[in-house]
Image (cartoon, coloured by chain):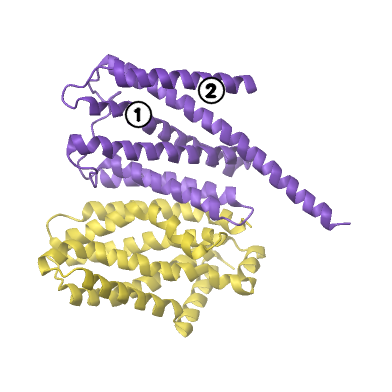
Chain colours: A yellow, B purple
Amino acid sequence: MSYFSIARSSLVKDIRLEWRSKDAINAMLFFALLVVVIFSFAFDPTAEESRTIAGGLVWVAVLFAAIVALNQTWSRELRNQVLDAYRVSPATGTPLFLAKAVGNFIFVSAIEALMTPLFVVFYKLRALGPVGELLPTAVLGTWALVVNGTFFAAISLRTRSREVMLPLLLFPLSIPALLAMVNATTAILTGEESARFWVALLLAYDVVFTTACLLMFDIVLEAE
Amino acid sequence: MKRGFTLLATVAGLLLSFGLYEALIAAPTERTMGDVQRIFYYHVPSAWTAFLLFLINFAASVVFLVRRNAAADILALVTAEVGVVFCTVVLVTGPLWARPVWGIWWAPGDIRLTTTLVLWLIYISYLMLRRFSTSSQTPLVAAIVAIFGALDVPLVYFSIWFFRTQHPSPVIGGGGSLDPRMARVLLINWAAFLCLAGLICWTRYLLEIARRQVEEAQGMESLLERSP
């Protein structure tokens, strides 16, 4: 099988599983809803204030929600020794990794799409800057979280209490990406400065870490 | 080997006490900041030592990935542990100095402060991974995380670059005007800290080797017991 057909069949399998069970999506959605509601109790901002804090809130909510999906990325493959079977097969690890990362990207993006209206309602948001720039910010930012998250979920498979280990590994490394996402979103919402620098930074982050993940995933997969 | 260790310990002890005297009594008092500035003789050498240790950790991790030898792995573990300790000293002494001088404990978004803090966080998570790991491949996974951490640091630095910095500019090689007497004290203290760090790393290295030998022996013993 070629590289892309392996990746595609793995991705289609993940999406079909998710479509039938809806485990990750439901958990993430409810979790994100809870975060939004609790934040809205904690702060009661005016429209002006909420523009400056919403960028931080929305990405923290997405980050926490994404952990739910990332944690079960690989644990699903541990049952029935699927991962071991993959390991002995002649296919390399990278198409599998790519499929998992793209799958997570789709799930987290779906959550973002569903959560955005909630945020707009709860925080009376109206962007003053170019709204179109939110799209590249969201796409690059989500990929930044998901690519490293998928990688570190594979690493934390081999630890005690792996659900705890994933955020401990992922959050420190994601700081530059989070900073860029939050600042870009705030810049667009307040319309005071350009988000260009932050989007470029996100792009650099994505390129660096996607390359690193693809180069090193085989080592992680074989490490047992 | 043993003589070298004693020698290093003696040198470290002498340099540390001499450095303490020089920093607290002999060095001239700074004109605007006063005696608070003397914390500089501990803050800056700790920072340089910590960064050097993290650099060694990165190099050792790369060597481990390529050559897979246990010595590189132990070196990586040891330098990360000791580096975190020195980095903690930096993060504690910094705010102690900043409070009277800047009027605030911490300047959020400052380039050097944030980079150091993120570096510290990354290495804490590195050590936690090593502690929590259950597989026999801990060194391999740890080496990968160390390399990811090293990739992250320039990005953090670059991301904060956008903000202006409050931190004083580098005193050595940065076009700063440091009194030569102060520079001398600084270098003495750095030498002392390097000796101390080397000493701790050395001890920890031997300890880790002993720990692994004990583990191996225990494993062998339980194997022998099981097979009659």
User: Horizontal and vertical percent for residue A51?
Assistant: 15, 64
Residue drawn at point x = 63 percent, y = 40 percent: B70
Q: Which chain carries label 1?
A: B
Residue placed under numbered mark 1 in the picture:
B42
Q: What residue type is labelled 2?
A: Ala
Mark closest to the chain's N terminus, 1 or 2: 2
Residue B128 placement, left or right of A118? right
Q: Which residue is drawn at 40% across and 17% down?
A: B18
> Is disc 2 placed on a helix, strand or loop?
helix
Which amino acid is tagged 1? Tyr
- Mark identifier at residue A82: none
Q: Which chain carries label 2?
A: B
Instruction: Locate the C terminus of chain B by quadrant.
Output: bottom right
Image coordinates for residue B102, horizontal then vertical, percent: 18, 37
Residue that mark 2 sits on: B9
Would you call the spot at circle 1 few (<14 residues within 10 Å), some (14-19), or many (20 or more)?
A: many
Which SS class for mark 1?
helix
Q: How far apart are marks 1 and 2 (CA)?
A: 19 Å
Q: Nearer the viewer, residue A41 or A56?
A: A41
Horizontal relation, residue A171 to residue B74: left or right: left
